[in-house]
């Protein structure tokens, strides 16, 4: 199962001129090889790309995406990643969605489809990634 990161979804919904083809191809590959996963954090982050909830729900069709809640165990792991980020000089004052997404992938044993490999490799080095 593959958790699809926000940046890949936004490449598709905005038809990003640089990344649309890559993201579209990877989504298609992942769909044909197994299940795609979305969680509430990702859902909320991509919601602004849609004017109506019904449009978003059509895009995140249950035929294509398994909706998983954030695992409780991911909360502490996200906090630990955030602590490491702050110790490295990060300036955000609360855990970023990427930390919850990475922690979810780790705890649930998911592969993560993302264009932000560096952040996930830094804070979640054991999460398998599909990235450029």
Image (tube, helix red, strand yellow):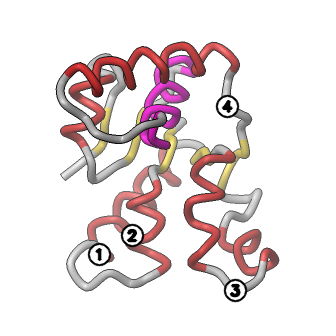
Mark 3 / mark 1, whichever is N-terminal: 1
Q: Is residue 115 magenta?
A: no
Q: Residues within 10 Å of mark 1 (few under 14, many from 20)?
A: some
Q: Quadrant of the N terminus?
A: top right
22 sits left or right of 26 in the view = left
Near-viewer residue (59 or 81): 81
Q: Is residue 105 magenta?
A: yes
Near-viewer residue (6 or 127): 6
SS state under label 1: helix
SS state under label 4: loop
Residue depicted at x 38% and y 72%: 11
- The residues bearing labels 3 and 1 have C-alpha atoms spaced at a distance of 24 Å
Q: Which residues are magenta?
A: 95-108
Contact between labelled residues 2 and 4, with CB atoms less than 8 Å apart: no
Q: Position of residue 73 (x, y in %)?
A: 63, 13
Mark nearest the camera among 4 and 1 is 4
Q: Which residue is mark 4?
A: 70
- The residues bearing labels 2 and 3 have C-alpha atoms spaced at a distance of 22 Å
Which quadrant of the structure image shows residue 23? bottom left
Q: Which residue is mark 2?
A: 24
Contact between labelled residues 3 and 2, with CB atoms less than 8 Å apart: no
Q: Position of residue 111 (x, y in %)?
A: 42, 33
- The residues bearing labels 2 and 1 have C-alpha atoms spaced at a distance of 5 Å
Q: Which residue is mark 1?
A: 21
Q: Which residue is mark 3?
A: 51
Mark 4 / mark 2, whichever is N-terminal: 2
């Amino acid at each position: 199962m593959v958790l699809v990161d926000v940046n890949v979804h936004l490449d598709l919904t905005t038809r990003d001129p640089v990344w649309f083809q890559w993201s579209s191809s990877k989504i298609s590959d992942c769909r044909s090889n197994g299940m795609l996963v979305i969680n509430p954090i990702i859902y909320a982050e991509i919601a602004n790309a849609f004017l109506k909830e019904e449009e978003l729900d059509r895009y995140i069709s249950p035929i294509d995406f398994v909706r998983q809640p954030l695992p409780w165990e991911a909360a502490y792991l996200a906090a630990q990643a955030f602590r490491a980020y702050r110790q490295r000089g990060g300036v955000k004052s609360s855990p970023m969605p990427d930390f919850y997404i990475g922690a979810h992938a780790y705890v649930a044993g998911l592969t993560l489809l993302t264009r932000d490999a560096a952040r996930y490799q830094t804070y979640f080095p054991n999460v398998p990634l599909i990235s450029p």
